[in-house]
Amino acid sequence: MSTIAEKILAKASVEKREVVKPGEYLNCNIDLAMGHIALAKVAANFMGIKKKYRKVWDNEKVVGILDHFSPAPSERWALAHQMIRKFAREQNFKYFYDIKEGICHQVLPEKGHVAPGMLIVGTDSHTTTYGAFNAASCGIGYTDMTIVFIKGTLWFRVPESQLFEINGKLDKRVMSKDIILYIAGKYGTDIGTYKSMEFVGDAMDNLSIASRMTISNMSLELGAKFGFTPPDEKIIKWLKPRTDRPLELVKPDEDAKYSETFQIEVDNLEPQVACPHSVENVKPVSEVKNVKIDQAFLGSCTNGRIEDLEIAAEILKGKRIHEDVRLIVIPASQEIWLEAAERGISKILIEAGGIIGNPNCGPCFGAHMGMLAGGENCISSSNRNFKGRMGSEKAGIYLASPATVAASALTGVITDPRDI
Amino acid sequence: MVKKEWNPVLKGTVWKFGENVDTDVITPGKYLDNLGECKKHVLETLDPEFPANVKVGDIIIADKNFGCGSSRETAPEILQDMGVAAVIAPSFGRIFYRNSFSIGFPLLEADNIAEFFNKGDIAEVNIETAVVKNLTTNKTIQCKEIPKILMDILKSGGQLELLKKELKARSKAEKQNK
């Protein structure tokens, strides 16, 4: 009678509860705690704690990573990175990934830190991404993380669970990003607030792990606490060569209770675009065709994976992007960057006129490597188009799939990738 | 952070905002390296008067999903630091919600709260009973009560203060056992 969220939270509860119900408050043991740039503030908080207790509860359950502002674009951020490196050394982190590795949500699964059934917290909102690996994972702030680092536990409210049944066959060059943007447009960005979302159905079963990560990642943009995609053998196959952790899937009971159920057909789904300045301001690509763009960004924890670069290369092979467009490509991790280089994907993107940056979060949240001036438009494979997020509040950010980003870079206007 | 004695009754002038106020318009990413500068731009894209005119004790009333977006704790932190006493909305971004209570910054939820207030009205808020009064229009709204676990955090002045208290007690117990 339990959902995935209820099962994982019950198992993680300090009281070792058998069954938990939505609305209950629990204290839970944390299996993994990931900290990024916010570790600078956790380190500062540590200084206010009595010296004998100033120690992470378990140095093997903590991961530190430098993916925001990497490499440091200013002296202030260099100082923050320096503080974090010092903190990781002092606290004897077993796992610390410096600027060379890439974005946390790609690097953690690749390095074997994530497995089904785990309860994971991270100082990044898109920590929901690990729902694609059947882990209950969510973002928290640096004060919460300070508590986790000292005690290894944190309070949770057991969320209501929602079921999204997604069926049908996606058209060529229509991607999982289009599904999640469609849901945002249809139901609004607060549809999943405080809730655990479970995405099921044959359309979900057919998606790759990378495509599912996009859905779990963006479930946060719908307000979700957790965002689970199907718990199936694809997860085991993906993780097995990468981790020694036990790989036991947590599946919902057949009579699990859901607060709401939604049915979505994707047979005739058009590519979708979230227009400025909200993730729920979504239109089918046919309604925004011909909006002029100045920049195209292909990257981020949402869509910077090898299949995303691959589809862009397929669209851009042997062609040149529009002369007025800057195409910025940032692979999500060093592993992806290497594979793209080895398989000739990078060569195609560079020859088409793109530039490729080192794996990091880049301009997605307005750090560096492609900020926007007033009056400019950017089509982006990232996750948020809030006013001013990538620079000027007078710039427009259009969120779309990697295929739509590549097609638009080619023509200089927002373009349906199926028309190329 | 201004530390004050616990007082469940707040009274202040209302600032009014719409739906889906995100963490990026509260603390824009481009100012995150300088929170002093950031204060000059808090919520300015939604209400240009806010950064210069907000004063200690003011109360924000907004529509649904306030604080959606990033996990950046700077968002509730900067509002608290600028003197905002509380935010009331139908719902909040869940990380903003956690982060606010974590630093001892109270939030209340009521579905139709936005209908009852205009910018500049005077609000009286009882955090403990979750009763909100509009003293300008003389209307009373019952919000959802704050769960006990969060009320304990608020009364302690935030999670860090609560943790320090716990560690102090642990230290004392350890000494006694020796």
Image (cartoon, coloured by chain):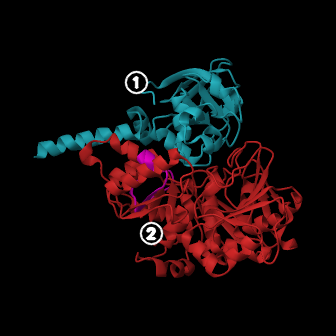
Chain colours: A red, B cyan
Q: Badge 2 sits on which subunit?
A: A
Q: Quadrant of residue A214?
A: bottom right
Q: Which residue is mark 2?
A: A113
Mark whose residue sits in front, 1 or 2 = 2
The answer to whether B129 is drawn above or below residue B72 in the figure is: above
Please tell me which residue is depicted at 48% across the width and 61% down the height of the picture: A6
The answer to whether A60 is drawn above or below residue B168 in the figure is: below
The mark found on residue A242 in the picture is: none
Q: Quadrant of residue B15?
A: top right
Q: Position of residue A105 (x, y in %)?
A: 54, 63
* SS at badge 2: loop
Point out the stretch of residues depicted in magenta: A19-42
The Cα–Cα distance between marks 1 and 2, rounded to whole angstroms, is 43 Å
- In this rendered view, identify the residue nearer to me: A181 or A11: A181
Q: Position of residue A380 (x, y in %)?
A: 72, 59
* Lateral position of residue A390 relative to residue A406, left or right: left
Asked if the stretch drawn in magenta spans residue A205, the answer is no
User: Is residue A282 visible to the viewer in this orientation of the structure?
Assistant: yes
Q: Position of residue A227 (x, y in %)?
A: 58, 62
- In this rendered view, identify the residue nearer to me: A22 or B168: B168
Q: Badge 1 sits on which subunit?
A: B
At label 1, which amino acid type do we have? Glu
Q: Which residue is mark 1?
A: B5
